[in-house]
Amino acid sequence: MASKTRLPGRDALRDSVLGGDLVFLLARANALTLAAANAALAEHGLKARSYSVLALAADGARPTQRELAEFLRLDPSQVVALVDGLEQRQLVERRTDPADRRANVLVATDAGRDLFARAQQAARAVERGLLAPVTPEEHERLAGLLRLLAFPD
């Protein structure tokens, strides 16, 4: 008689060695967060990456494309495509950097700032939903720990 092998259930997987692996937990949290953010941002014609570029332009940071690539940890060609897409929608403009006339900085248009404000509300709603099980103190602690990991220098 053949024995049936029980497939691990959700709890068995969660309690596995991988369920306690910090790299896995960070990757899974990232995947869940990105999926939720992309779903909420879709109504604004954005995804997490394009939202990030627009946010930095709307915030007045005036980043160069190289700075965006380094900060967002993206290949420069990916940043070019993201900026091109936002520029085609007239949400951002490339302007000559007054400090280095060989470089361009990214600036949000009025339409870009307006869209960012609406999209930011959607992103904040996703954050509140994902962090609902976390106390405000834990939220602050988590943000601080993630900043330490994201910006080690």
Image: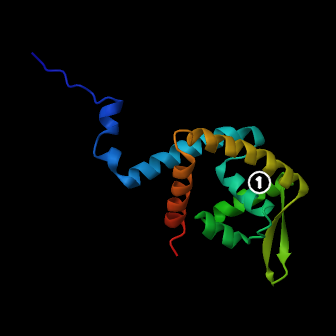
Q: Amino acid at mark 1?
A: Gly
Please, is residue 125 above or below residue 104 in the view?
A: above
Please, is residue 80 above or below residue 4 in the view?
A: below
On screen, residue 21 versus residue 42, left or right, reads left
List x then y, in percent, for residue 150. 53, 64
* Residue sitting at the far left: 1
List x then y, in percent, for residue 11. 33, 32
- Residue at 82% from the left image edge and 48% from the top image edge: 115
List x then y, in percent, for residue 8. 28, 30
- Residue at 75% from the left image edge and 57% from the top image edge: 54
Colouring scheme, one of rainbow, by chain, secondary structure, one colour: rainbow
Answer with the quarter of the image where residue 104 lies. bottom right
Q: How many marks?
A: 1
* Residue sitting at the far top: 1
List x then y, in percent, for residue 106. 79, 67
- Residue at 32% from the left image edge and 28% from the top image edge: 9
Please, is residue 57 above or below residue 89 in the view?
A: below
The residue indicated by pointer 1 is 85
User: Badge 1, how many Cα within 10 Å: few under 14, some, many 20+?
Assistant: some
Give the structural element (helix, strand or loop) at label 1.
helix
> 4 and 85: which one is in front?
4
- Quadrant, the N terminus: top left
- Residue at 68% from the left image edge and 47% from the top image edge: 47
Answer with the quarter of the image where residue 7 lies. top left
